[in-house]
């Protein structure tokens, strides 16, 4: 679910005429502005206006005036400025001061003072962001509008959209399982850090990542206070953070992956989720809402083996945590099938409710004939019948890492399991 949030600065130009009937063309006039934050839905104070500044830049690039002030998490703030009549570019910022912005852009502290010449490439500048910003930090915002004509002829008003420089990712945790849960944090990705455009591109949709961004496959974020979700609770606990603009293309599956760190009845554990195909990017100013319901899923695997001659069945000799050891005595075709159900007594899910991804395959001894493939509700592979380096049977161990995705809504549950395929002597 994506909720777009926008902030608007509305400029109402109240033009004042002098008592003289012969005003000079360059005569200064007062302009009344109203800074307004238009929030859709409940927001915290750090997403509203806490500090602000606006600069008007003339055609010659000179900063004609700067207005600034502080607020206390408000949606609207009014002020006045005075400039000569003319056409201006107007730049507006909230929750990031002039000095802080100058430092972030590598400019002199006086770069945004009245009378200074604005850098010619200012509109195309970037500033560095981390991959994640804490939930309680003030969210910086920016906006610009060209062709603002201030005159003494007609009362005019101008609206400048100022958008958040970060995207917001919010989680709604509910618990349909039979045990109490505390969510202590998440691991989320892929994300990026590094340069981000100072201003929005003006076209909604997939962000254009700035040159020089650094990719992070996963970024861990610990909640300041664990989210408590009692067993069988209909209530929802929410937590959020802010992210650099990102796309999910960097992940091999093309989807965002989420690992939820939690405590069940006081015991530490972790659950994996994959977000649906509807979410493939996160832009600045986006509000991404991710509902996650904890269920008592259970998983076991069935292995079928078809050796070239009978008498050599596959044997599951050990299951340790999330690792499986399967021993074979000959070459042949094998199939791994997942059996998933909710709780110990629920019905097993049909194959169309599951999706398989082979995360990695390691086969240093070459016991596999090609790479296994995910097909027909399972994973199929072949043990090679080629001789080993010594001319005898090809023996050794291969490792297959498998992700089983249970289709269960916006955030699908994912089981990551590792299989050790062992080829022994007959």
Image (cartoon, rainbow, N blue to C red):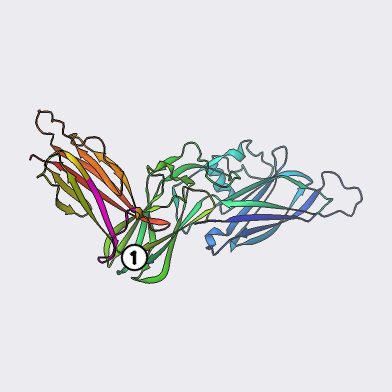
Q: Is residue 372 left or right of residue 216?
A: left
Question: Quick one: 216 or 317, which is closer to the camera?
Answer: 317
Q: Residue at x 38, y 58 (%)?
A: 408
Could you say where residue 87 lies in the image, as x and y percent from the top left?
75, 43
Quadrant of res 123: top right
Give the magenta part as a residue range: 335-351
Q: Is residue 271 left or right of residue 93?
A: left
Magenta-span inclusion, residue 372? no
* Element assignment for label 1: strand
In this picture, is 401 found above or below 173?
A: above
Magenta-span inclusion, residue 339? yes
Q: Residue furthest right?
A: 21
Q: Residues within 10 Å of mark 1 (few under 14, many from 20)?
A: many
Could you say where residue 293 lies in the image, as x and y percent from the top left?
38, 63
Quadrant of res 122: top right
Q: Residue at x 26, y 67 (%)?
A: 345
Could you say where residue 67 lies in the image, as x and y percent from the top left?
67, 52
Quadrant of the frame with the C terminus = top left
Could you say where residue 143 lies in the image, as x and y percent from the top left?
62, 48
Name the residue beneath numbered marker 1.
182
Q: Residue furthest front?
A: 309
């Amino acid at each position: 679910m994506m909720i777009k949030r926008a902030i608007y600065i509305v400029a109402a130009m109240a033009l004042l005429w002098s008592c003289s009937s012969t005003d000079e063309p360059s005569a200064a006039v007062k302009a009344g502005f109203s800074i307004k934050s238009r929030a859709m839905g409940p927001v915290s104070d750090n997403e509203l206006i806490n500090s602000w500044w606006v600069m008007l830049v003339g055609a010659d690039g000179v900063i004609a005036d700067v207005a600034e002030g502080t607020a206390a998490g408000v949606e609207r703030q009014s002020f006045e400025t005075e400039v000569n009549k003319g056409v201006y570019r107007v730049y507006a910022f909230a929750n990031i001061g002039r000095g802080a912005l100058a430092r972030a852009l590598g400019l002199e502290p006086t770069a945004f003072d009245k009378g200074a010449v604005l850098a010619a490439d200012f509109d195309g500048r970037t500033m560095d962001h981390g991959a994640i910003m804490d939930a309680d930090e003030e969210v910086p915002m920016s906006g610009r509008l060209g062709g603002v004509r201030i005159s003494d002829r007609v009362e005019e008003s101008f609206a400048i959209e100022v958008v958040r420089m970060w995207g917001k990712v919010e989680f709604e945790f509910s618990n349909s399982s039979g045990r109490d849960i505390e969510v202590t944090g998440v691991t989320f990705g892929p994300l990026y850090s590094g340069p981000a455009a100072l201003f929005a591109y003006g076209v909604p949709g997939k962000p254009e990542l700035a040159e020089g961004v650094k990719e992070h496959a996963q970024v861990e974020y610990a909640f300041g206070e664990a989210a408590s979700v009692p067993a069988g609770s209909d209530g929802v606990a929410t937590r959020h953070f802010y992210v650099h603009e990102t796309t999910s293309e960097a992940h091999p599956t093309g989807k965002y992956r989420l690992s939820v760190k939690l405590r069940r009845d006081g015991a530490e554990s972790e659950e994996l989720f994959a977000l649906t195909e509807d979410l493939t990017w996160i832009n600045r100013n986006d509000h991404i809402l991710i509902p996650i319901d904890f269920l008592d899923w259970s998983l076991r695997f069935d292995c079928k083996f078809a050796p070239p001659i009978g008498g050599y069945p596959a044997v599951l000799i050990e299951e340790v945590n999330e690792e499986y050891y399967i021993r074979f005595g000959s070459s042949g075709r094998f199939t791994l099938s997942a059996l998933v159900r909710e709780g110990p007594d629920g019905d097993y899910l049909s194959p169309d409710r599951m999706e398989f991804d082979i995360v990695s395959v390691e086969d240093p001894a070459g016991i596999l004939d090609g790479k296994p493939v995910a097909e027909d509700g399972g994973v199929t592979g072949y043990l090679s019948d080629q001789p080993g380096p010594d001319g005898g049977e090809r023996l050794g161990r291969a490792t297959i890492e498998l992700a089983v995705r249970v289709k269960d809504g916006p955030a699908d549950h994912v089981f990551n399991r590792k299989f050790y395929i062992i080829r022994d002597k007959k």
